[in-house]
Amino acid sequence: MKPEGDQEQQGSLAERLNSLFATARWTDAHGRQREYSTADVAKAVTADPSHPTTLSRSYLAMLRNGSHTNPTLSVLEGLAKFFDDHRPPGMPSVTLPWLVAQEDPEDELLRRRLADHQVRAIAMRAGEMTPAMRRQLLKMIAILDQDSAVDRGTDE
């Protein structure tokens, strides 16, 4: 589980929920560590007097398997609170923003563009430049963009 502050907030809500289920534990009467079941969590979220959320086992199961992907804010708040209250010692807080994090569409575009070896090589070199050198490089790219627009017969 990689809550708050982790840069890899990737994955669907279902994947994040299942990660939380895999990490949160309780100790049974024999001292064994057990995972919370979907029914346990649904019951605990519903029973929590700190919020008005009710949550059925079947609805939580649909969130976990990805067949439902748009729960109410109150359901998400109840889940975030439950898993934050039951996180292992030393693990960062489970927050609502972490739970609902959506991948930025620009991240996917960046990944596709960086898949090209030449683009990646340019980016790596630019990362080693001083801020002044990067500004000069951006100016050069802007000039190349203008030249390319002229070649295509358009004015930008």
Image (tube, helix red, strand yellow):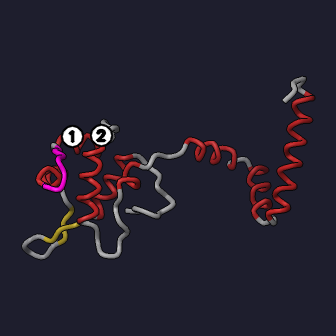
Q: Provide the residue span drawn in magenta.
A: 48-55
Judge whether residue 37 is colored magenta.
no
The answer to whether residue 50 is magenta is: yes
Dot 2 falls on a residue whose secondary structure is loop
On screen, residue 36 versus residue 144, left or right, reads left
State the residue position of label 1: 59
Vertical relation: 13 (above or below) 136: above
Residue 105 percent location from the top left of the image: 56, 41
Q: Main secondary structure of the magenta part?
A: loop
**Pointer 2 residue:** 71
Q: Label 2 amino acid?
A: Pro
Q: Which residue is at a point 29% across and 40% down the rendered structure image?
A: 72
Nearer to me, 36 or 3: 3
Q: Quick one: label 1 or label 2, which is nearer the N terminus?
A: 1
Checking the image for residue 109, the label placed there is none
Q: Quadrant of residue 27?
A: bottom left
The three-letter code of the residue at mark 1 reads: Tyr
In this picture, residue 151 sits left or right of residue 13: right
